[in-house]
Image (cartoon, rainbow, N blue to C red):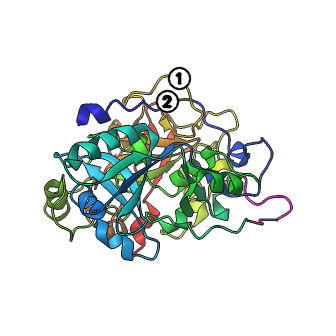
Amino acid sequence: LKSALRSAPALRQGSPPTGCSLAIGAAGAMSTSRLVALADRSVLRVAGDGAAKFLQGLCSQDVPLIATSSSRAAPAAFLSPRGKVLCDVILLSRGPSEILVDVHSGVAQNLVKLLMRHRLREPLKIEDISSSHKAVAHLPATALAQGSTSSGSDVQPDLPTDFFLDPRFAAVGHRAVLEVAAADALLAAGALDLSAYHFWRVCCAVPEGPADLPVDSVLPLHANLDLLNFISFKKGCYTGQELTARTKHRGAVRKRFFSVVATADGSPQAFLDGLALAPEAPLPAGMVARAAASNGSTDLPGLHVDGVAGGEPLDEAARSVQALKPGAEAPKASGVLHSVAGNAGLCMLRCEGQFNERENFKDQSALPDGTALTTAASLPLAWRAPPYAFVE
């Protein structure tokens, strides 16, 4: 299983678009639309009597309850027997015997193999329906990296009822899985590039796909999946449950994803302080983009997920983050960059204290006050706790 999922193509390092290009539509013109075709996502279908029960034993979500929720959608993770993440998905209930699986394309076929292997004699149909269905996102106005349009107009199309608030963190916006014809008709009037979605996702500190969750390498709590509604701690057994529950209730969670930002003036902490954000608010995309250096010198050395990156993947050493704590003579490695979009990114930091619960983010900082955080190339960084940790 692990070797199969690890065959997913590697994400590549390269120069991301500038802040303004994040709002360029597919035709190359400035667009007021906030729709995005999620071209790096695939759609799977599990259908037949017992579809929910089948997935219940394989993933971290309480699958039967999805059909009773208002959105009929929920995030879930498939774990290895070691309790590490194989892939993250969003499950959509289409009735008692049909569930759609919105998953990153890089691991989609391997997830199909996993499901087929566990199906045994169950009367289920498991198929990739990406040729007939498409995942689409609708971002909030605050996600536009260029800020307000010059005319101030923000006329949006009427969204089909298929759209639902992102079940991981509502601030990310709305999303849907639509038939291709319906999606294309909706997107025909204009759409943002995929890079706009990922820039906003990073501003919201939401991990996604193999850039943030390399196959069988990351514990779900280290990736904040418990804070993002991926895990039910009340359901019965599923693969990887024992270690997940033990880590949550008896272990010490000392790694978490945090937002990091670099600025052209080399003073990112002053920039964050100046924003005076409520802790539950995402980073403002426009202001973050405008704080970047125009020559690309503030681009973070992580795994670019804007869909247009090229070049060789960066190894973990190049993506490492150093912390110089007060009184220390030299910095020490304290984290690794994952998803990055220009001068913003997600960093998995080793924390000073335990961060098992949401309350821990309110009571303490990941690193001591006065700690200087930099990339391996000495680019100054500021870090910020994920906003959803402050949302009950």
Q: The disc labelled 1 sits on which kind of residue?
A: Gly
Marks 2/1: CA–CA distance: 6 Å
Q: Is residue 189 visible?
A: yes
Front in this rendered view, residue 294 or 5: 5
Name the residue: 73% across, 45% down: 24
Task: Say whether residue 6 is left or right of residue 288.
Answer: left
Q: Are marks 2 and 1 in contact (CB under 8 Å)?
A: yes
Return the x and y of residue 387 as percentages of the image width and height: 46, 64
Label 2 belongs to which residue? 12
Residue 341 picture quarter: top right
Magenta region's main secondary structure?
loop
Quarter occupied by the C terminus: bottom left
Q: The disc labelled 2 sits on which kind of residue?
A: Arg
Residue 35 picture quarter: bottom right
Front in this rendered view, residue 239 or 196: 239
Q: Is residue 326 visible?
A: no
Secondary element at image label 2: loop
Label 1 belongs to which residue? 311
